[in-house]
Amino acid sequence: MDISLFKAAEALRGLLDQIDETTGEMPEGFEDARALVSTKAVAVTAYILENGKQAEYLKEAAKELMDRARTAEKRNAWLRQYLASHMAGAGITKIADERGLFSATLDVGRDKAVEVFDAAQLPDDYMRLIPAKVEPDKSLIAQAIKDGFDVPGARVVARDRLTIR
């Protein structure tokens, strides 16, 4: 019989409601139902641990792939600069693959960009204000409440914690 932890716990709760209030006698099957809930809980715990390990592995694999992608992007940026500087140094503005699959064109002086070499010298008219991010400081709020202060809009709540090792 394949039963979920939810169904097993529900059945156990039903048996708990059948405990004789005067004698405290447990209904028939109570111990078996309790053992089944425990067995199912152990299986769910094992699954949580395994799933957590898989998630960590996937995060690490994703991080490694992102690192490799960033390395490839940096390498390409360096290669583009390398190619452009040597084409400019040789006076070459266009190259092409002999099969016509790809080409590269160097447009000398085409793109314009503002370079700020000393922001302190710029007049205020050329500056912009980027507002700071405002968010609740939870550690400061927790300390204030712990010290006996009332903090409108916040409270400290107790939560259950499931520890799996």
Image: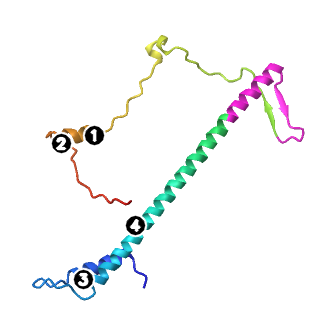
Residue 111 in which image quadrant: top right
Of pointers 2 and 4, the one earlier in the residue sequence: 4
Report the residue marked by disc 2.
146
Q: How crowded is mark 3: few (under 14 residues within 10 Å), some or many (20 or more)?
A: some
Q: Which amino acid does label 2 sit on?
A: Lys
Report the residue marked by disc 4.
45
Are dots 1 and 2 in contact, CB under 8 Å?
no
The mark lying in front, picked from 4 and 1, is: 4
Residue 60 spot, x, y in % from top left: 54, 50
Q: Quadrant of the N terminus?
A: bottom left
Of pointers 4 and 1, the one earlier in the residue sequence: 4
Residue at the spot 57% in from the left edge and 51% down from the top edge: 61
Q: What residue type is labelled 4?
A: Thr
The mark lying in front, picked from 4 and 3, is: 4
Segment colored magenta = 75-101
Give the alpha-carbon distance from disc 1 to disc 2, as whole Å: 10 Å
Q: Is residue 108 above or below residue 78?
A: above
Of pointers 4 and 3, the one earlier in the residue sequence: 3
Q: Quadrant of the C terminus?
A: bottom left
Of pointers 3 and 1, the one earlier in the residue sequence: 3
Residue 61: image tag = none
Report the residue marked by disc 3.
15
Residue at the spot 22% in from the left edge and 45% down from the top edge: 154
Residue 104 spot, x, y in % from top left: 79, 32
Q: Please say whether residue 46 is visible from this viewpoint.
A: yes
